[in-house]
Amino acid sequence: MRKQKAKRIVLTMFGSLGDLHPYMALALGLRDRGHEVVIATSEAYREKIEGAGLGFFPVRPDLLPPDQAQEMIARVMDERRGPAYLFKKVLLPYLRESYEDLMAATEGADFLVGHVITLAAPLVAEKRGLRWASVALQPSIFFSAYDPPILQAARWPAWFYGLGIGATRGLLSIVRQVQSAWLRPVGRFRHELGLPARATDIDMQVSPYLHLALFSRALAQPQPDWPPQTRQCGFCFYDRLEDGQKLSPQIDSFLDAGPPPVTFTLGSSAVMSPGKFYQESIEAARKLNSRALLLVGADPGGILSQTLPKGIMAAPYAPYSEVFARSAVIVHQGGVGTTAQALRAGRPQLVVPFAYDQPDNGARVARRGAGSVISRRRYTAVRAAVEIHALLIADTVTERAGYLGDIVRWENGVSEACHEIEKQLLKGD
């Protein structure tokens, strides 16, 4: 391959930190290869992105600050109505603004990297004649009939998928039709822009040039019905502390003060609508007589102001790479970013899915022998204590989690993804 010239590359995304962090990791990898890199996303992430030394460009819609976002997050995280609400009430009303902002962000760009819910990305790429890549951060995006996802709104019984590829493909087609109805405004906007008509479905978010699967083979293997332009690279990790900070002395001291604790976290979205998760978790830890670390975010449940039992600590945040490997068991919501970090740590997991890809990610962890799953509605202190105890004493689960951790740590998602993007850049020269 001939030497790669420096290019201007724009990465655009919308979502939580679990969505942002892989893009920051990829952006830093591309920057280190000499490219000019800009992340185009919500204004709320400007400080974080610029603090990492990366270019930033604001793209609407903006994220609400945590103290105003709780009601919206609760609706977005509703396991049945959440996806429709996300598209119809959060994303589509800003389609024109997103397009205008992203057109400005891509002025002079050589390549664009999109996100599955950045609806303007394919429009901008096509209008500008840009080569671009789409990204799948989780296996459920693929809707593979050979490796079917657990669907949040209808967790179809295993026997249905057992009816064969044809029946599974038919079911997934019905779900796609429902999603396609949400995207009809995108088709109308394409017409206004003078772009050729395309079938209005979720596949319109997939680049015809390069589709990056940024998750590990420890979570899912390539399937025959993945788009042929898919390249599976592995997870892209970023969770560093800003400005050279270290893990807080309080958390570091707590982790060193006794046996590894059970760590409870809900990522960066579900944590804003936790329900009774943390209260039940505290009681579960008490029943087990186990040390516990609770990561509670902005703390809408008021855990930080409570007097907690001895051996239990609560904190707003800690980098997962710093605390997961020092944990006995990790209890989390199953977001792909959190799942990736837990897999890399090689520790047993108890997954409590809230919405979207989380039931599928949890099921995959369980099928691979690295943990178990409790539904959000059935998560009580008694059930959690039973499941956590089972994970603590199961040597086979610990061994399997360690094996999967070795796979994840061996992969280099950033390097592989950068390599695939640079191959596309050479084709465009």
Image: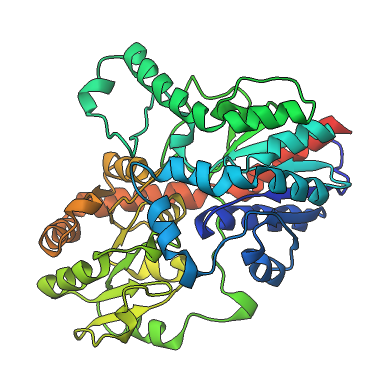
Quarter containing the C terminus: top right
- Tell me where residue 364 appears, x and y as whole percent: 33, 40
Relative height, residue 115 to residue 51 (above, below): above
Q: Quadrant of residue 96?
A: top right
Relative placement, left or right, of 52 versus 311 is right
- Determine the residue positioned at 41% across, 61% down: 71
Relative height, residue 149 to residue 379 (above, below): above
Q: Is residue 206 visible?
A: no
Q: Quadrant of residue 125?
A: top right
Relative height, residue 387 to residue 210 (above, below): below
Relative placement, left or right, of 132 versus 409 is right
Q: Is residue 192 visible?
A: yes
- Tell me where residue 162 appears, x and y as whole percent: 25, 19
Q: Nearer the viewer, residue 413 or 84?
A: 84
User: How did the renderer colour the structure?
Assistant: rainbow
Q: Nearer the viewer, residue 168 or 228?
A: 168
- Determine the residue positioned at 69% across, 40% down: 121
Q: Nearer the viewer, residue 214 or 187?
A: 187
- Determine the residue positioned at 62% across, 28% down: 204
- Tell me where residue 105 appears, x and y as whole percent: 80, 51
